Image (cartoon, rainbow, N blue to C red):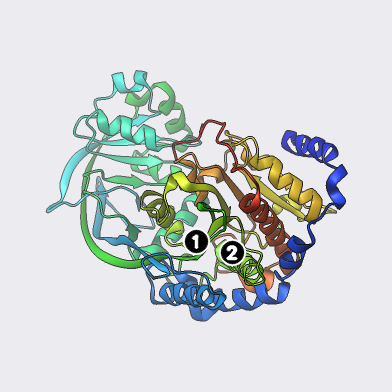
Amino acid sequence: MNKGLLFSGALMMGLMTPVLAQNPTQVKYANTITVEDLTKHLTYLASDEMKGRDTGSPEGKIAAQYLADFYKGLGLSAPVNGSYFQNVPLVSTNFTKVTLQIGKAKLVENTDFVFTGDGNMAKAAKADLVFLGLVTDENLAKVDVKGKLVGLWAVGVRSNDLVNKVMDAGAAGIVIVTMEGQANFDRIANRYKTLAGRGRIGFDQEIKQRPIFMVSSDKMAQLFGTPVETLKEAAKSNPTSITSQKATYQVVKTKTPVEAVNVMGFLEGTDKKEEVLVISSHYDHVGVSSTGEVFNGADDDGSGTVSVMEIAEAFALAAKDGNKPRRSILFLNVTGEEKGLLGSEYYAENPVFPIANTVNNINIDMVGRIDYEYQKAENKDYIYVIGSEMLSSHLKKINEYNNITYTNLILDYRYDAEDDPNRFYYRSDHYNFAKFNIPVIFFFNGVHDDYHQVTDTVDKIEFPLMTKRAQLIFHTAWDLANRDQRTPVDGTNTRTDR
């Protein structure tokens, strides 16, 4: 059994005494979070008509307006100078021409290679393609990389630092293998092909001449005229045994502004109103495929978005009945998560309310499905909890107490390990709050066959389970918003580098 689960079970035993001490007011408003309401909102937001809610798309703007209208209808304040929208200044970058020729072979973009770097070149450049293999000091001492395209073998490791090291050594560019097998590469190439027409969306940055071409292991072997197994062995300590090749390449880049917004509704607290609890989700997804199929994004992250809506409604109804929270609550639906956590990064660096006054971030990203690990389990009432004890020793215990008292879900911590190979902690919007030492808690249902596929549709959502998960999050938020002391920051952020 996972050590995190064992710890959770031990804590549960220690907290069994107050299980029956439910707050009836809390229960009353938690019960306003219903299957019917979640279904209604998600059926709209994840419909084919919404065309995948791509960042900055017309349908993305419609989704943003739907959220703003909902918050207005609840009576929540518009906190951005009277608006529910925070403009996020993004640009769409298109590489209108990317060519790569090795020897006499002209490679096809998003079929033979994927361009993952940056650059803008008035004319094609010529260089030798040399093989370095593994990025070690020993290999770098053997291979002259200055002014060359450099072939890297980076299977099973984080490649960013390796690319930086080789570029810093004077390389003109990189040709890199990050995974073995043509099928794995083809999946990534198809994703890039889908995104190619819309461009890459991000913040406007200075152009860097960093041409980086990702290829499959089979293609790399083909380019060097060497079997894959021979190439793998040479990558370890004998890179000079691989004959260099002649290369020609060019990258042409254009940039276009993108109109994108974060959406937020604000509920002012009472005696601790200067302190703010942020409850977040991302409302964008990845749009439409190159063949016109819609990526509905029902689970990712339609499920989190409608959960935030329903939690907001529960708090708004309580406030109308005279049960306002002591702390203020910001309901925040961010844009650009699928493009690199952009909306949450912009909010955290340009907060509407001071970061110092932000007590916690509860982030909800994919809470509507059952993942591989639990598909065959007898008890499927679970949720993965990530990041809850890194910065505050109290946050995890508060969540567990509310779970024991109200919802009795399995709280699974297997993905909370610092060495989690999936790196889920780094892949959603809470990350940008934790960077500023705000204690965070990330709720997640894990991945499934429909993750980032056109088959992530509403009919596959487990609405009763999603309702229970949203009710747990409401109970935890109620506790955090009303307790006497904010959760202390008594831990250290040990996960600062994405």
What percent of the width, then of the height, locates residue 214? 37, 46
Which residue is at a point 38% across and 70% down the rendered structure image?
Answer: 82
Asked if disc 2 and disc 1 are in contact, CB closer than 8 Å, the reply is yes
Judge the density around disc 2: few (<14), some (14-19), many (≥20) Cα neighbours within 10 Å.
Answer: many
Front-most of residues 357 and 447: 357
Which residue is at a point 81% across and 39% down the rendered structure image?
Answer: 9
Q: Quadrant of the C terminus?
A: top left
User: Which quadrant of the figure has residue 462?
Assistant: bottom right
- The type of residue carrying mark 1 is Leu
User: Which quadrant of the figure has residue 148?
Assistant: top left
Front-most of residues 417 and 254: 417
Q: Quadrant of the N terminus?
A: top right
Disc marking residue 373: none
Element class at badge 1: strand
Judge the density around disc 1: few (<14), some (14-19), many (≥20) Cα neighbours within 10 Å.
Answer: many
Disc marking residue 332: 1
Front-most of residues 91 and 422: 91
What percent of the width, then of the height, locates residue 90? 31, 60
* Mark count: 2
Viewer can see residue 295: yes
Residue located farthest toward the front when viewing the structure as drawn: 271
Front-most of residues 279 and 307: 279
Q: In the picture shown, does residue 347 fall above or below 291?
A: above
Disc marking residue 308: 2
What percent of the width, then of the height, locates residue 49? 50, 81
Element class at badge 2: helix
Viewer can see residue 291: no
Horizontal side, residue 403 vs residue 94: left or right: right
Which residue is at a point 32% across and 24% down the rendered structure image?
Answer: 240
Q: In the picture shown, does residue 139 fall above or below 190?
A: above
